[in-house]
Structure formats: structure tokens, C-alpha cells
Amino acid sequence: SQPESVLLCPLGTAAAPETELLCIFGTGDMGRSLGQRLLQAGYRVVYGSRRPHSCGPLPAGTQVMSHAAAAKLATLVFLCVHRKKYDFLETLAPQLNGKVLVDVSNNLKEDVYPESNAEYLQRLIPGAHVVKAFNTISAWALQNGPSDANRQVLVCGNCAEAKQTVVAVATKLGFAVLDNGSLSAARELEEFPLRLFPEWRLPLRLAVGLTATFFFYLVIRDVVYSYVEDGKDISFRIMVSLANKVCPIVAIIMLALCYLPGVVAAILQLYRGTKYKRFPDWLDRWMLCRKQLGLLSLGFAFLHVLYTLIIPFRHYVRYRIAASTILKMRENTTAVLDTTLAWRTDSFYSMGILGFGVYILLGITSLPSVSNALSWREFSFVQSKLGYLTLFLCTFHTYLYGWNKFLSPSNYRWYTPPGYMLSLVLPSIVLVLKLLLLVPCVDRSLTRIRQGWERTDPE
Ligand code: HEM
């Protein structure tokens, strides 16, 4: 037999509880998209507008009325208007008292106002519970529904209950929620959408700076030098020969810069005798952009490999080979195979290929999908051991390329060293320092420090 209470509620009649009514102030893009999604998630939506009769098309099924009337109906109000227009809210303070007020606003630039929009709002309406949320989600993402890349709604606010209400709405809309704490975090949330690849900024500037410096250096040393000293115009070499010098030079310097901060940090820890002192800010910032430095460097190395692959097709190279063959035929001479040269070039290519191979492996393990599948030990093994191996192989490749040219004065045109010699300075320093750190007694001290041991200096 059925319990009586169920029989009292026959199917189809008012069994469902009244759906919650939410209010949105503002009928712009964000307001409309948010309203649409809220409707889809099963909420009722009422808009508050300055001109309820002429505010343009709104999602079907929503109502629009004056701000005061709309605010009275709902316990939660989304504020989708620009900060500049917040003044009108002061007159609505009585209606907004005790309500949850969700600030979704963003600014066009950082640091325009002394306080965050949400804190300003809280100051205007002290009686409301202001929650900052949804500002990191674009109107476009709201319309399309959450995709992997924009699934997170960041939330902050001073009233835990108010925050919980907003979290429930965001979850119902299909977003993952990340609680960022009190309203004092609002500034950080408001800066979030303005960010443009912040961790890439320093490595990119460095790459541009190094490329420009070496490009001009090599143009002067190669092209201008030839023109001035020999009267020959070899400017065509800028396109491939010069590019194929600048790219590997920038690549190897940036690769060394990836591993230099780790070595500097180790020396600093050894010197201080503890791991508990903070590193200087510049070192922290440098350490944090190692991945980007490495990936950019890999990009330059890849270009170097591509440029190297096309060498045999170059008109200039084919012309040189043909000319030397014809000359030998005319002179009726044959060249003998120089096995030393063959050894040298083969080993230098081989080191380059091996270096590039390990380098690709490093690049692959830095992809989040791969690195997330590795344990911390595996990840640091790959990034550190294979990293130094890459640096070693690439440096060796460049030393072999230089071979005995380091000693011949004719290579120092206008008293300047060739680009690859300059490029070898940093990698060599890093490798020597790393070797010193691997000396058993030094390594033992460093390991102890990293396990938490501290040197206590005698008073
Ligand atoms: C130079 C081949 C990978 C760094 C060269 C040159 C060749 C070459 C043919 C001489 C270019 C010229 O005549 O101007 C290769 C091959 C590689 C490879 C076949 C792998 C498939 C790498 C990698 C690095 C590197 C991964 C390091 C990031 C250098 C440097 C030079 C050089 C610094 C000297 C550039 C200069 O002329 O000033 N490589 N390379 N190479 N390579 Fe590589």
C-alpha cells in the first residue's frame, strides 16, 4: 500500500518547488548571456534596468522592471554594469540591504582605481553581502557553456553564506568553483582577465633582445666587413647563413640561462648553509620562467635544424660545389679525402642530432598532460639530468664546430670573436659550475642542506 503523503501529491500538480528567482542589473552583453544561462539552468530571471521599456532584446522568458522593483523580488542580485555607473546603487541601499550582491565587473586596465571594484561596491552598500565572481568568465563563454579552458569561476567575499549561495548557482551552471577567500582578493581576481601571458614576458623580451643583438653583430662582422675590407657584396647571406647562426646562438644561450639559476641557487644555499632563507626576488622570478625560456630556446633550435636541412638546396652552395668541381677538372687534380675533417664534421653533426633529440624529449615532458602523468622524482630527473645532457651535447656540438678556429687570429675580424664563440661563454660557465657542484664533498653538503640541515656558524 502507498503511504498517504504520496497520494496527497498526485503527479503533475505543483509537486515541484517554486524555482528560485535571481535578479540581474544591467542588460548589456554580460547581463543577457548570464540571464540566458540561468534560464537554461532552471532559474527564473528578472532584470533591473534604468529604462525597463526600451532596453533592447532580452532572453525570452525573463522579466524586466525598474532596479528598485527587481531588487525587492530577489535575494541575489548580479551586478553587470561598469564600475563608473555604480553611483546609482546608493539610492537603492534600502532594497539591497541583506541581499547577496555579485560583482562581475572588470576594468580595462590595471591599477586605475585605488581599490577593487568589489570593495568599492561594498563601501557604497555596506548592508549588502558583496561577492566577487564570474568576472573571469566571458559573456561568450557563458553563451557557449563551459569548455575545458574556461570552466573555473573564481569567487571571493567576506560573508561565507553569501559566497555559498553564489557557489551553488555557479555549480548549477556547470562551472567548477575556486574559493579565493575574502573580498580583499577581489583586486587579484579583477587583474586576472587582464593578464597576457605574464610568464612569457621576460623570456620573450630576452629572445628578442638576443636575436637583435646577435643579428646586428653578425651583419657587421660578416656582411659589412666583407664589403669594407674586400669590396664584396654578400648581403644575400642574411637570409639563410646569418639566420642559421643567430638561431642556434640564441637557442644555446637561452638553454644555458635555463640552467644557470638552478646552479646559482645551489651556490647560494651552500654559501648560506641553509635552505630556509628566501632567494632574492630576481632569482625567484628567473626560476619561475625556466620552462618558457626552455621552450623558446627549443623553438630557436628547431629553426636552426630546419635552416640546416635546406643547406644542400641553396643556389649558393650548389654553385660553390660545381665551381670547385669544375676547377679541379680544369686543373686535372683530385682532392684526397680528409678523414680528420670527415671525423670532425660527422661528430659535430652527430652531437647536434643527439642534443636535439634529447631536447625534444625535454620539451615533450614539459607539456602539462605529460608532466602530470610523472611523479615529482621522474619529472625532476628528466628536467635536470636530461637537461644538463642536452646542454652538454649542444655545447660539445658547438665546440666541435669551432674545432681549431679558436686559435687562429684570422677569425677575429676587426678584433671581434665569431658569434658561436660568444655563445659558448654562458653554457661553458654553467657546465663547469655544475661539475663543481657534483664533486662528492660539495654534493654531500648540498644534499644535507636540501634535506633541512642548517650550518650553525660558531659565534
Ligand atoms: C652550427 C647542424 C642542432 C647549436 C651548426 C652548423 C650546422 C649544424 C650544419 C653550421 C652552420 C653554419 O655553417 O653556419 C646541426 C644539426 C642539428 C643541430 C644537423 C640537429 C639535428 C643544434 C642544437 C643546438 C645547436 C640543438 C643548440 C641549441 C649550434 C651552434 C652553432 C651550430 C651554436 C654555431 C652557429 C654559428 O655558425 O655561429 N649546426 N645542429 N645545433 N649549431 Fe647546430
Image (cartoon, rainbow, N blue to C red):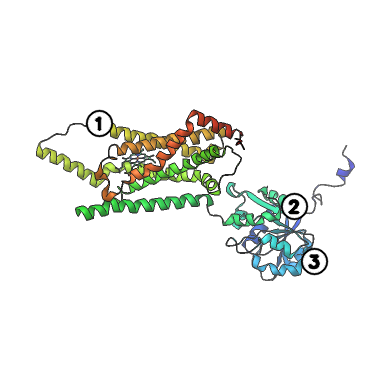
Q: Can you tell which mark lies on residue 431?
A: none
User: Residue 340 — which label?
Assistant: 1
Q: Position of residue 423 (x, y in %)?
A: 37, 44
Residue 114 in sight in this render: yes
Residue 66 at least partly seen: no
Q: Is residue 389 positioned above or below 218 on the image?
A: above
Number of numbered discs overlaid on the protein picture: 3
Looking at the image, tell me whether mark 3 or mark 2 is earlier in sequence order.
Answer: 3
Judge left or right: residue 32 versus residue 434.
right
Q: Position of residue 147 (x, y in %)?
A: 59, 48
| Up/down of 28 relative to 386, above or below | below
Which amino acid, by three-letter code, is at mark 2? Thr
Residue denoted by label 3 = 94
Q: Secondary structure at mark 2?
A: helix
Does label 1 point to a residue whose CB lies under 8 Å from ligand 1?
no
| 172, 371: nearer the viewer | 371
For ligand 1, give the image quadrant.
top left
Residue 410 image point, x, y percent: 24, 45
Q: Residue at 59% of width from left, 46% of height from top?
A: 148
Q: Amino acid at mark 1?
A: Thr
Residues 97 and 185: in front is 185
